[in-house]
Structure formats: C-alpha cells, structure tokens
Amino acid sequence: MTEQIDKALAREYEAGFVSDVESETFEPGLNEDVIRRISGMKGEPEWMLEWRLSAFREWLEMEEPEWALVDYPKIDFQSISYYSAPKSMKDKPKSLDEVDPELLRTYEKLGIPLIEQQMLAGIAVDAVFDSVSVVTTFREKLEEAGVIFCPISEAVHKYPDLVRKYLGSVVPKKDNYYAALNCAVFTDGSFVYIPKGTRCPMELSTYFRINEQNTGQFERTLIVADEGSHVSYLEGCTAPQRDENQLHAAVVELVAMDDAEIKYSTVQNWYPGDENGKGGIYNFVTKRGVCHTNAKISWTQVETGSSVTWKYPSCILKGDNSVGEFYSVALTRGRQQADTGTKMIHIGKNTKSTIISKGISAGRSNNSYRGLVRMNPGAEGARNFTQCDSLLIGDQCGAHTFPYVESRNPSAIVEHEATTSKVSDEQMFLCRQRGLDPEKAVSMIVNGFCKEVFKELPMEFAVEAGKLLEISLEGSVG
Amino acid sequence: MSNTKSLLTIKDLHASVEEKQIIKGLDLDVKPGEVHAIMGPNGAGKSTLGYVLSGRDGYSVESGSVMLDEEDLLEMETEDRARAGLFLAFQYPVEIPGVSNLEFLKASVDAQREARGEDAITSADFLKEAKAACKQVNLPVAFLKRGVNEGFSGGEKKRNELMQMLLLKPKLCILDETDSGLDIDALQVVAEGVNSQRSADRSFIVVTHYQRLLDYIKPDFVHVLSDGKIVKSGDASLALELEAQGYAWLQKEPVEDELEG
C-alpha cells in the first residue's frame, strides 16, 4: 500500500505558476539600511521607522527557536530579499482599471476574481502580492458601515492613532525570534477596525501571494473589533513552485474589546515542496488575540501547504467570561513538517476555551500538535476542553501530540482527549467494495475526520477547504 | 434452468492469505436468480471466498478462474467488481466516523452509475429512495444522517448493510455470515429484506455457519465448504441434514487452523 501512496501523492501543486510581472526587488541582505529603505518605500512616519529599528536591534540579540519538532537547515537571513513589489504598483493605482492586468489575472487564476461584480457576493478582499497590497475591494461599501479595511501600510498614514495604539499590543516586538524579525521588516498586510456595536456587513478576506524568487514575505495583520462589534475574516495563501525554500514570517494580532467577536479563518496552501522535500515555504507565524470582557475569538485553520509550519494561533482570555476557540485541520504529506497548535491563557474569571485539532499525516511527513492551556490564579471557574485527533495514512509518517497544561487555580477545569487512528484497510475495502475509487475513499474518510472543524468555517470556504483536501490527497491510497 | 447463461462461474480456484492457502480448488456455478448457501465449519474458507471474489487486498489468487457475467472478475480492481454488480455484505461492518450514511451511499451510487454510463441521480430522488430503503430494513430515517456504522448496534450494522444492498441493486450479493450476532427478530428483518430482493436477475451467495438463516431465506442449492473445497452439494434438505449431524461426517481430515470466525 505504501508504494501506491507515495506514487499517488506525487500530485501537481495547482497554484505553482509564476506570474510574469516586472518587479522592483531589493538585493538580498538585512541591516538597518534595508529597514530604512523599506520604511522609505512606504513613506512611513518617523515613529514607525523607530519601532522597526528597535525591533531589529532586539532581534539581533535573539536566538532562533529550536524546540519545535521540525528539522530544516539554518536559514541564512542575509540571502533573502526583504522587499519586492511589482513596478506597476509604484504609482499606486487608484482603481482596478489602473492595476496591471497581469496581477488581476494572477488572482483570477487562483480563483479569486478581484472585479467586484464577479466576486462572491458579500466578501471583501485585500490582495497582497509579495510586499504590497494590490487592491482592496468593496471599500466604499464597508466605509458606509464605518468599517476600516485597508492595507496596513496605508493605515499607518491614515489611522496612525489606531495603529500606534494597537500594533505590538498583543504580540510584543520581542515576543519571539520571527515576530521580532517581522516587526523589523514587515511590508504589508491588512488592517481592520470595526467600530462599536457594528456587525461587519461582509466577510473580509486577505489573499497572500508570494511570486518573486528569493524573497521573504513578512506580512502584518491587525484587527481591532471595538466594543460589541462582530467580524469574520479569512486569509488564503499560495506561492509558485520553486526549488529554493522561501520564508514567510507573519504576525497577526487580534483585539476583541468588551462583548466583541472575531472569527478568523485561514486556508493555508503555500507551496509544500516536492516529494523529496526540495523547495517549499517555511511558514513561521505568530498569531495571537486578546479578549476583553465577554469577548470571543475563534481561530479556524486549514493547513495543507508549506514545507515547514511553525504556528500557534492563541488567545489571551483577559476579560471575565471571555471565550477562545481553536479549530484546526493540518494535513502533511510528502516530506512536509508541521508543528502547530494553540495557547489558551486564561486570566479572567469564568473564561472558556475549546481546542479541536485534527492532524492528518501521509507519506513521510511529520505532524505535531503542540498546545498550552494555562489557568492563571485569578481564572476562577475557567474551563478548557481539548480534543486532539491524529489520522495516519500509510506507515511512514508520524503524528505527535505535546499538550502542556498549567493550572494555578483549583476551581479551573481542564479536559484533554486524544486519539490516533489510521485510515484502515477495512475502511478502504468497504468504500471500494461499494464502488468508490481509492482517492475518493480517502478524501471521504479524511473529510469525515475533519467534519467538526469544517463546520466552523464560513460556508463558502468550508466547500473550498473540502476541495483543497481532495486535491491534496489526490490519488493518495491504493 | 440449466440452459440459462451463468452469472458467476468459479473454476478450480486456489487462493491464499499471507502465503497460507485457504481455497484449494473450488468450483461453483451460479445462474441468475439463484440462491446458493455455502455452509461449513470454522476455518473452511467461507469468509475468504467472499473476500477473494470481491478483491480484498492481501488475498491472492494462485490459480483458477472466476467469470462474472462473462467478464474476468479476477482482472478487475476491487471497485470495478462492485461496479460490475458484485456486493459483499460484511460480517463485521466497519465504522467511518464523520461520514454520513447518506453521503456515503450517494457517493457509492454515483460512482456505480457513472461507471455504467448512467445519468447521475438527483439528491432529492436519492433521498426519497434512501428513506424508503430505511423503512424497508426497519431503520429510523435519522440513521441516514449518522456516521457510517458509527455507534450502531450489531443488528443495526447488518440492517445498514442490507440498506446499502437495496440502493446499489447488485447482480450478485454475497452475504457473509449475516446472521451472526443477530437475534431472531433482527434475523427476520434481514431475511425479509433479502427475500424482497430476490428476482430473476439477482443472485445470492449466502455464507453461513448455521442452518437457522436458511429457515428464512430458502436456498436453491446448499454447498458444504470444507478445507477450501466444496465437498458436498445438494438442495435445501442438505442444510437440515447438516444441522442434525454436524460437519464432522463430511471432513476427511481435521481443519488445520481456525482462521476465521
């Protein structure tokens, strides 16, 4: 069976094409001058540059983390280019008509038409290409509701007070090695502000595309949901198929004020590298949200891409009665490695968290769940429920679970359930005996395994995610 | 009947599991509409026969031939055998958590129809058929929404197998010890379901250890399988004889291993 799995898993990565766009790309290398140039390209105010430089100085003193169960050669940070933007973006196109058609075609090929009339109704998109935002749709409609949805580079100019107040407030500059690096060199990303008592009238989404060779993508997303507001946000990611590894080190910060709710969904499909582990994206991401009183943050992620994933979307449940959720499907195959999970930090009273993690490993991949549930002394009556399920396809892959629980309040309740199962020969035989081909059988079994997570995704994306898994598993078992 | 074309013809079949020979020269001829019972002691190769015919991984055919509807069954992939009309009702149906019965059944029916070049059935029509099938096997309609066999009792699993058979409408049904673990009421429901499906263009191979099931499903032929071969064939009365006398009088030598239940 293993031989057939290996053979069948050698499928095409559909988003692996390269767009022929003339770009302005920095020479590889990282120093204070490079940071000044990035800041200069963005025409940033002095405070922003100073913030970057102080992060860079912190970063120089820090060590690359090595505790994750992933193995990759040391990254040479001097061989990476830290800025690349299509030349056509230099004049800052005012409308879609002024955007380079090749860029629009790129997104169309990826299934994300940026022409508003052609888009799924009710979804606004910010399209980020390498280091710049290409276009943000439906902005006027959102502005009517008082919602701000724009590239973060623009927010620095237009809403400096909000950005200064919240940037780095959830993930401090020296939080970790990659976060510090991101603070120093971040190029673009999305900024969202939902005013008090507002329910965002549409789904917001950002689509990240890495195109240029030897560049890193360092995006920065900041979402602030003011008191009693509500927003659902989705991000998607793809990159061309290249033999060199590329670094993607993003930081996402969420702030949910009192009674606010943020639902953040990710469908991550960065290039995973080839069957022998050549190429692919290093996806080293810090995502964290803070919940004030009665607030709720829900992370849902479907991770199928990247050669190495290091990612722990977390919630700081600061306010009383706040709620944190983490729903995750992580699929690894070939030589992919994923070390992913969450941290739920219970500070307020009666805070609640739920963690549902589904790891699927195939080929020679390694898939680890790593999670921390911490009940602080003040977290009276706090509750956590964790369920970690691993599914193995074939016999050369690995699934690992590293749950950390720290409880400093005797009234807090922490529950943890974990299972490991295989796509069994019996299940495969039953499906095939009923007339299903092996590919369909595996994707059906895997989809069933992930059901609890998929139902958390916004409807349109649940279907997408199911299809993505189907493609990822194309011909995976015989 | 002897002038009709055969649906299934097995000739001198030798097959093994993990390099151990289990089927040792088996012949069987099944014509459309016939019901054949295969009885025998534990370890005779009864379940193995069903797995070999349906093409389960790990079961290899060493020699002999099997023709289904004049096609070489042994050349086909597992799923193609199913699409050609072969259905195996499992002795121990496996669970597929999170995949709803309805989803599973619709996908199976779609795959089979597509392979035969038939139009896809609409979801609404299929739901109607599925509900009717539920009713027929005495399962609440809510079972369509539950995961395949997930948390089903033994009897419910068997009835679920039967429901799949009703919807897939196979030409040849192999019932692998469908009676095992069933109480008399459940047995009757299953038997009635099978009887309702008997027709001139559907044949059955009923594999069973006990005569009991054959009180409800009347076979046209009864065969005794012992040590990988059919050692005796007869009509329904043979089953009664076996019930009275056991299998020992038919066995020339003791069975080596109890490979199956």
Image: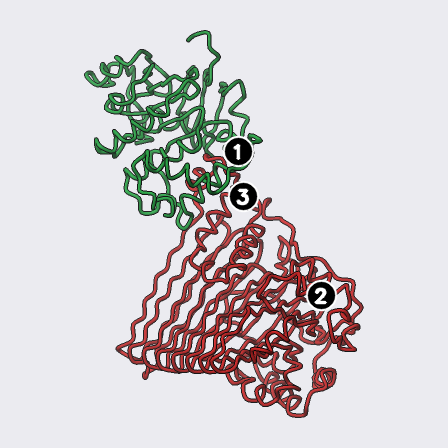
Chain colours: A red, B green
Residue A337 got which mark? Answer: none
For label 2, the crowd category at 10 Å Cα-Cα, with few meaning under 14, some 14 to 19 and many 20 or more, is many
Have a look at marks 1 and 2 and say if they share a chain: no
| A273 relative position to B224: left or right | right
The residue beneath circle 2 is A211
Residue A244: give x, y in percent of width and height. Answer: 69, 63
The residue beneath circle 1 is B113
Spatial distance from mark 1 to mark 2, Cα to Cα?
43 Å
The residue beneath circle 3 is A439
Q: In this orientation, which residue lies closer to the viewer: A76 or A443? A: A443
Q: Quadrant of residue A240?
A: bottom right
Q: In this orientation, which residue lies closer to the viewer: B65 or A86? A: A86
Residue drawn at (49%, 41%) of the image: B107
Residue drawn at (34%, 25%) of the image: B196
Label 1, secondary structure: give it: helix
Residue B104 vertical position relative to residue A72 in the rendered view, above or below: above
Residue type, label 1: Arg
Residue type, label 3: Glu
Label 3, secondary structure: give it: helix
Residue at the extreme front of the image, as rendered: A144
